[in-house]
Amino acid sequence: MSAGYSNKLVKNMLVNKDNKRKSFIVYITGGFPDLKTTKKLILGLDKAGVDVIEIGVPFSDPVADGPTIQESSFYALQKGVTLKKILKMTKELRGEINAAVVLMGYYNSFLKYGLSKFVTGCKNNGIDGIIIPDLVPEESCTLSKLAKENGLAMVFLIAPNSSEKRIRLAASRSSGFLYCVSVKGITGQRKKLPDISKYISKVRKITKLPLAVGFGVSNNAQAGHFLKKADGVIVGSAVIKIIKDNIKNKPVEKVVRFVKSLRKGF
Amino acid sequence: MMPDKHGYFGKYGGMFVPETLMPALEELKNEFFKATKDKIFKAELKRYLTEFAGRPTELYYAEKLTRYLKGPKIYLKREDMTHTGSHKINNCIGQALMALRMGKKRIIAETGAGQHGVATATVAARFGLKCDVFMGEEDCKRQALNVYRMKLLGTNVIPVTSGTKTLKDALNEAMRDWVSNVDNTYYMLGTVAGPHPYPLMVRYFQKVIGEEARRQILVKEGRLPNFIVACVGGGSNAIGIFHHFFHDKKVKFIGVEAGGRGMKPTMNSASISAGAPGSLHGSYTYLLQDKDGQVLNTHSIAAGLDYPGVGPEHSYYKDIGRAEYTPIMDKDALKAYDLLSKIEGVIPALESSHAVAYVVKNAKTFKKTDLIIINLSGRGDKDVGRLL
């Protein structure tokens, strides 16, 4: 485990696990529809009892994402949203919220920013962790080292087809939680979700890290389904869709209402 | 020998992909290494390259072009004479045999100009594989003839409407499809880019170009060429002809990139000449990107060069100085397209016309005794409709 207990992400996840409380993780695209709304959303999500907020850093070529998050990402890019602007916004929220804040984005955005500058930027601007869907543990040596030195948590993803060896590798490099992708596929809503019992049991035997399941969760029944086995659930596209459908019609209120109703079901 | 076991050519290459693809890439890599040691596989590959693709291709002395330029002696490596009309078929035959070995019943591919798509559709028909090709909506319009050819061959062409609706987005969609159908699907990547082992594997299937050319030039001239010139989009025809000459240090490699309408951002596809290292589509390599690392829109009159990245081995060649990379503009490529058609009776693909243009433009800088091989990677019939 890299980041210590002083890290808010690690702490939030572990406190929940000790208290047998399920963790609720919500993804929103940074700057969709604008950064002011993102800021309000973060405050609203925090009040609604979300434990971890993932802020997506928009990228031109999001290969792990389905149409909903892709479109939100393009929208934000066209409005000129950058990593620098996102960090400026999160800085203003430092000390204001209980939820841990994690940046989720594609590797090239961070590479171009400069890995060292990125990690200190995270540390100084209220970011607790980093998730990069196109960075596997083998390729993360430099970033993992920098993250550790700066007390940031790195969260790696595993998939249903990951071997025991790969799960062990991802777990050894992750802190806070291990991101268990529910299906072989990309982000987005699905009508039918897979049975993850065997998958999660396999992962449990390998690591004591809290396990959060994501990709495809859009309602109470689905969240409940995953939470029978996992320690936490991640909701993304469903939230983005609500923002998109209510872009001029109080998106923050609608999202908070949705998230609260999901939280109640845990 | 590059790449190392992690797929790195110096600092370039690697595997920058979602976790779900890692087991599939591991499987592919292991199977590829087994195949390259398998005599039966190699014999089959050779047989299909000969009997189906029509290899070896000629190394043709371009006598009239040589006389016209009053400069170096020029040979054309005639990849345009292969079945389907470009070097792409070499890789597709190899990868189709890989798919069969691995028991995959469905193949997917991305295509820009449609040359790789057509080659993929061709092998899919020949080997009885179900085939879906992703093609940007814009490219579908620009290359309607190739869309028709793919459909005729029984392939399902999926127009891509996300992002910029061109080759890079087709690649994104192909990767998303592969992540979602990884158990039964084989991803037939068309160039020496992407995550390890693709740059290595595609090079293996394309290196036949250089192996033949080296043998042929020694028979015809009794010596090695001074220069080898090839166009570079992703860079598979260039690596294909360069690779076997790698240790012949006196043979200079020139990679010709698409200079488009000029060197301003979004006006060209010259990833090495105008880009900076970054990560896209699975590897760390030169990339056309803005100051925030967003991948830029690209332009080239040759759809097959219209891609913001480049194979990682080229990035490595650039840094160690093994090859020189230089852009040629649309207008010069068009002139060369016209010139070669008129004086040699060979209509080159607009992609390959960039390599011809480089030699035409720089004819005076070569010595009269210089020997040059231009890789004529494809034929230009496909471009006639667009230029009418």
Image (cartoon, rainbow, N blue to C red):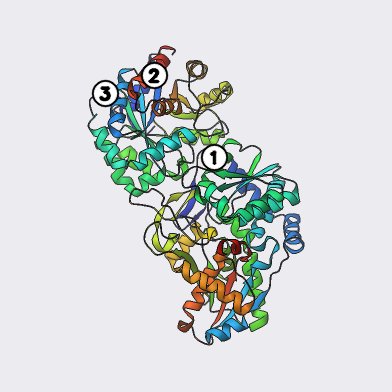
Residue A26 rendering spot, x and y as whole percentages:
39, 25
The crowding category of the residue bearing disc 2, from other C-alpha atoms within 10 Å (few below 14, some 14 to 19, many at least 20), is: many
Residue B381: quarter of image: bottom right
* Residue receiving disc 2: A259
**Nearest the eye: B44 or A255:** A255
Task: Measure the C-alpha gap from mark 1 to mark 2.
Answer: 28 Å
Look at the numbered discs 3 and 2 and tell me whether their residues touch, using CB distance below 8 Å: no
SS label for mark 3: loop
Residue A134 rendering spot, x and y as whole percentages:
46, 41
* Residue receiving disc 3: A97
Q: Residue at x 56, y 64 (%)?
A: B387
Q: Residue at x 59, y 55 (%)?
A: B143
- Give the amino acid type for the residue marked by disc 2 in the picture: Val
Task: Measure the C-alpha gap from mark 3 to mark 2.
Answer: 16 Å
Asked whether the viewer can see residue B95, the reply is: no
Q: Which mark is residue B176?
A: 1
**Nearest the eye: B324 or B83:** B83
Residue A219 rendering spot, x and y as whole percentages:
48, 19
Q: Residue at x 40, y 38 (%)?
A: A73
The crowding category of the residue bearing disc 3, from other C-alpha atoms within 10 Å (few below 14, some 14 to 19, many at least 20), is: some
